[in-house]
Amino acid sequence: MILKPSPQDLKNIGYYLGKIILGLGLMMFIPVIFGIALGEINPALDFLIGLEITLIFGLVLSKLCFTEEDLSWMQGMIVVSLSWLAATLLGAIPLYLSGHWSSYLDTCFDAMSGFATTGLTLVQDLDHLSLTHNLWRHLIMFIGGQGIVIVALSFFVKGASGAFKMYVGEARDERILPNVVHTSRFIWLVSITYLILGTLALGTIGVFEGMKPLNAFFHGACVFMAAFDTGGFAPQSQNILYYHSLPFEAVTIVIMLLGAINFKLHYHIWMGNRKEILKNIETRALFVAIMATFLVVALGLNQKGVYAGAIALFRKGFYQLVSGHTGTGFMTIYAQQFISDWNHLALVGVIIAMGLGGAVCSTTGAIKMLRIGTVFKALLEDIKRIILPDKAIVVKKMHHIKDIFLEDKQARAALLITLAYLCLYGLGALIGMWFGYPFLESLFESTSAAGNVGLSCGITAVTMPAALKLTYIFQMWAGRLEFMSVFTLIGFLVSVFRGR
Amino acid sequence: MMVKKVHGSWFIVCGFIFLLATNCYAQPVSSTELISSAKAYDGKTVAYAGEVIGDVMVRGEYAWANINDGQNAIGVWMGKALAANISYSGSYKSKGDLVEIVGVFHRACPEHGGDLDIHAQGIRKMSNGKQVTEKLNLSKRNMSLVLLGVLCLVLILRQLKQA
């Protein structure tokens, strides 16, 4: 029997949702101040309107649903999934007011793409978009990469024991420090330290490459936020191709890889345990996966013969591959070139890389390396069991921060999430094909959306069907939250209508 | 006499055609056409027109300018002297110069790490860019004021209820 949710369930969900919306509203102060400082008055007004609507919504919700009760697991998961939808709808308001998006659906597409650190975009005339709006496009990646709930946990939800339930619901099942609020603050500390260093590095390169200093450092900050949070937006329509710069590409590769590493690993490196990076199953798996998929891409590109020298092949092939593997979506080629200049083998290499992703508890999407490593180890264990005598005891260990004995339940959980991602990639590809796009292109774009990557082979465009835009929005949302909170929300909605 | 006149006319027409071919620009090719049919245009001299956007990035004796024709922006590699003709580049606060360039198109430029680009041989400014002065949008201002009132009301009601 399905039980109908009680009024107290709704109150708890509404109260914490209101708190998170308030956190989002306060983040909008940044572009308002930035816009005023740069003299971009109309863009500043767009954000003032967005901020006011968001704060009103958050205040009313947290007041109407005021409660001192703690969240249950189910409520925590629902708060997280609803927070992401609310952030998309409210965060899209200032972007829509700019007039650079042709419909509110397109704006929501970009807002979800930003929060989920995907990078697919439907913006029009990006080269004339205000710096204020551009800052917000990248800031939402920074917020979404760390986690919308992390923002609220860090500043608003002090010491609430329900915090951990929301933290887990946002696809972060690893605590770096014993206290989840301290964990959230550590994540911010790492991100802001790298933000300063990354902006300085990219800004300095920009100045040496001929950009005006203000532009160079603004681009540096935006590109850093998009790279470290494995987002993929860029301030100009040509994405990273705009800079025509090898040093810029090299530094963004390093930042993308830093973003693809587990925050827990960052913590251990910061604490001086540098050997962990060599021993960790995730970094090992990431290295092997990047090399293997690059081999496929390089063979494909070599067959096609578009890139004459090894340097050109490496700059184009390796850059798009790392961008895809880390879930960033930066591009140094045009979307159409994936189809016209790359052959099927190279495309498949990139699709596999996009589908695998980076580390758990990082800013990347997709299946992730810990699960790939776990499944691989479990497979080896099973093969050993078959080969060795019946009485032999097979014990499989793996190293992730500490030595872990591999159990069946871990392998099962890793396989289930892997299967869910594969189904999500396939679902998007089927819908793409239903709208008449070829198989490989549909699979490419679907994997990119569901894996929160952002590479595009040209399907993502203003002219694509609204149903396909909605499909990709759903894929970005479900992929970023790693299914559980989305499934819980669906179950909750069923219980609202069918429960007793 | 008549034959001489006809020969003279032909000479003038041929001279005019020669001048057109050497000094004037061919019909510009769109960026979409260049990108989608890159193989066909690779290594050929093309004309391309659009607005200069972003920074003109000087690199030694050369410079990169990105030119957007309304469909895509393409990187154009040109001598520093040619780049000096550009006065405005497009952004939120300015409309960039509209230029037409003639140059060699590369599908995957070996000199620039495989970039799809054009190496400009000549540039012609079609129209000057300008600074864009922002006018205050009154409806946005009024809406923000109304919402500010509502926000204050909500805050006051919350305080009253708490008291």
Image (cartoon, coloured by chain):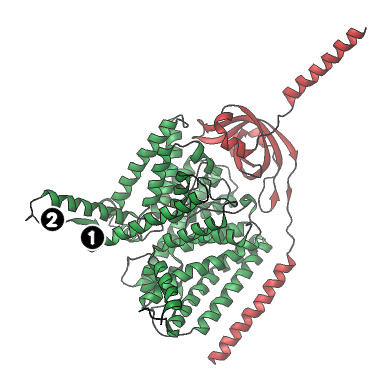
Q: Residues within 10 Å of mark 2 (few under 14, many from 20)?
A: few
Determine which of the numbered discs, if any, sits on residue B89 in the image.
none
Subunit of label 1? A
Q: Quadrant of residue A491?
A: bottom left
- Along the line of sight, which residue is nearer the eye, A209 or A156? A156
Q: Chain letter for green, please.
A: A
Residue A35 at x, y = what percent? 63, 62
Q: Chain letter for red, please.
A: B
Image check: A211 left or right of A189? right
Residue A160 at x, y = what percent? 39, 79
Q: How many marks?
A: 2
Q: Which residue is mark 2?
A: A394
Mark 1 residue element: strand
Residue A285 seen in render: yes
Q: Which residue is mark 1?
A: A402
Residue at 60 percent across and 69 percent down: it is A50
Residue B152 at x, y = what percent? 63, 81
- Along the line of sight, which residue is nearer the eye, B106 or B111? B106
Mark 2 residue element: loop
